[in-house]
Amino acid sequence: MNRRTQLATLLALACPAAFAQNSVTLYGRLDGGLQYLNHIATPSGGSTSSWTAEGGDWGTSMLGFKGSEDLGGGLSSVFDLETALQVMNGTTGGGRLFSRRAYVGLADKRFGQIQAGRNLFIDSDGVWEFDPFVQQAFSSASLVRGRNWQQTSNNVEYHSPVFYGFDVQAQYAFGNRTNGFNQGAPGEFGRSDGIMLTYHSQLFDVRGIYDELRNADGRMTNIFTSSREYFVGANVRVSKVKIQGAYTHFSAPDTPAGLSDSADYYWLGATWDATHQFAVTAAAFYVHVNEGSGDATHDPAGHATMFTLGSTYHLSQRTFLYGTVAYVRNSSQSNFSLLATSRDATGNANTNPLPGESQTGAYVGLMHIF
């Protein structure tokens, strides 16, 4: 045994706790299935239906690495690297190596956690827990065109400890531009921020969120892409049933004159755990875009209601089958899809119906968590 090997062996024997207190975890989930949608608008002014193989209808497929190191005295260093995956073609989310999370931070049992990097925007991190369909493809993101499931870069974020059931989360995303404090890089969001207060108990949970999501020009010009959000949600547990409801108000003060610059959004739903394997969820979602006209990227005054019914059947702790059906009814000027499709989507990305037309859809699939 040479001297280097002897030294390494002695260090390992002398400091076993230090080696044991470091951890790195590989985690993820894979989701694949089939999807049906009708009444998809075509460029010629007609409509069509689609049958597609889809990954991520129940939830985003992802791959991640997270870890921590005990630094002593209740302090730890932490990190998380996580990317979205598309199992149908093997690509990653948005072409990024780590599209969802890439941050490093310090966590203290007494003072909370502070971290810096890329992460889910604060409403995405906070809304899903109060969505009966946990932000599936047909869920709370649909009637707001994906406003509540974004990610932002250049984040500084703080999570408080839980104190008598209460905790606070705050997030500040820098624009990182020298020519304008609120601006962001092309294709990125500008300076954005938010704060979230939550109360958890065995019987119910309540959460409030205020956030501001700015576009690359540093402005809030569209209620569903760059705007202010006021959110309040609640969960109530009664035996085998969980009831979930929420209200959100969106406003975009920099919207061009004459276009709709605010909207109100509501939902109510319940999940029944019929057995330890089988659960059924039903929910209704309603959005009302307030006064104003629309254009290619802005929704005009109008409203839409979506009804969703779904179920899961667990084959094991980590694998389950799922099936969901939904129907959306639009007012005369609205064209909301069952999917979180932008108003100006074109080509294969477009799933919007014609204005005033309803849409029906369904998907089935398999989720495996590891």
Image: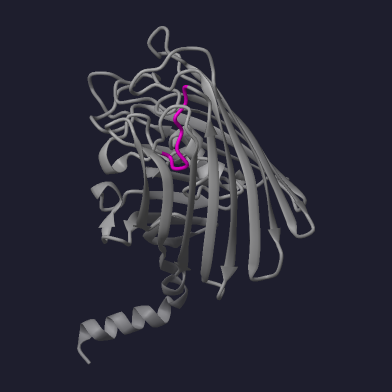
- Outermost residue on the bottom side: it is 1
**How many numbered circles are shown?**
0
| Residue 124 percent location from the top left of the image | 48, 41
Location of the C terminus by quadrant is bottom left
Q: Is the magenta stretch mostly helix, strand or loop?
A: loop
| Residue 106 percent location from the top left of the image | 45, 50
- Left-right relation of 62 to 211: left
Which residue is nearer to you in this view: 191 or 145? 145
Residue, x 54% and y 55% (percent of image)?
324
Span colored in magenta: 333-340
Location of the N terminus by quadrant is bottom left
Which residue is nearer to you in this view: 147 or 298? 298
Look at the picture and state if 337 lies above or below 326. above
Residue, x 47% and y 12% (percent of image)?
292
Q: Can residue 299 be seen in this view?
A: yes
Residue, x 45% and y 38% (percent of image)?
337
Look at the picture and state if 230 lies above or below 274. above
**Is residue 155 found inside the magenta-colored segment of the image?**
no
Residue, x 49% and y 53% (percent of image)?
362
